[in-house]
Amino acid sequence: MPRALSSLEVSEPTTVDYGPTGRSASIDGDRVSSGLPATASVGELEASLRSLRFLHSGASFLARLDDETTPVPSTATVLDMIAGSTLGSVGAGQTLYLGLFEDADVADVSLPVPAGTAAQVFVESTAAPGSGESFAFTIIKNGSATSMTVTVSDTSTAGTTTANPVGCANGDRLALRLVTSAGAASAKHRYSIRYSISA
């Protein structure tokens, strides 16, 4: 028989407290919408709880979830990340393209993306290129170089940029080009791209 529950506590640290209407609830202080009436059955509350805990886990990723009185925006931006690395060390005077792994052919590693923007690039190498040497990274879109670049030089082993973000349409393909200078030290390389998906 359905019955109203004012609160429901599960294994630590998550506690769910239902509001007076049963339409909203808070999990560890974050307010979310349950969509259930105040007379929901225990089974319905448990099913809702599992969904709420899933949403709560994603709340830090999506910043926050608003209560049911807040208008739902017509568009939203979801953050995602594209990442990869070289399979081994890359020597001096090399040009490679990075997707999930590296290849000399950009077409073999380019990754299709949904509509959005490549907003930030992070790169890291296991060794510095050396005095007067460099590792140059450039986002490649549909086989062509863009203006979004990061250069790691001299004694540095990491770099990042938010300059010249790259806008993409559904199905555009991205890769990261790595060019090591003629006297650069041998190193392994990894990268990540902060990608904002337009939904």
Image (cartoon, rainbow, N blue to C red):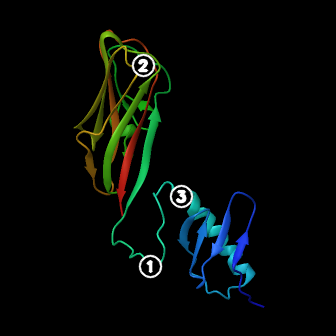
Question: Does 134 sit above or below residue 77?
Answer: above
CA neighbours of label 1 inside 10 A, class few (<14), some (14 to 19), many (20+):
few
Mark pair 1, 2: CA separation: 55 Å
Q: Front-most of 95 and 107?
A: 95
**Image x and y of residue 67, in percent:** 48, 73
Q: Nearer the N terminus, badge 1 or badge 2?
A: 1
Residue 95 sits in which quadrant?
top left
Disc 1, disc 2: CB below 8 Å? Answer: no
- Label number found at residue 58: 3
Please give left or right for residue 85 compared with residue 118 in the image: right
- Label number found at residue 90: 2
**Image x and y of residue 136, in percent:** 30, 24
Q: Residue at x 73, y 58 (%)?
A: 12
Name the residue carrying label 1: 69
Q: Amino acid at mark 2?
A: Val
Q: Amino acid at mark 3?
A: Gly
Q: Check the image and name the residue furthest to the right.
A: 1
Q: Front-most of 104 and 6?
A: 6
CA neighbours of label 2 inside 10 A, class few (<14), some (14 to 19), many (20+):
many
Please give left or right for residue 28 compared with residue 195 in the image: right
Question: Does 74 sit above or below residue 123?
Answer: below
Q: Nearer the N terminus, badge 2 or badge 3?
A: 3
Secondary structure at badge 3 equals helix
Image depth: mark 1 or mark 2 in front: 1
Q: Amino acid at mark 1?
A: Thr
**Image x and y of residue 195, in percent:** 37, 48
Q: Residue at x 51, y 55 (%)?
A: 60
Mark pair 2, 3: CA separation: 37 Å
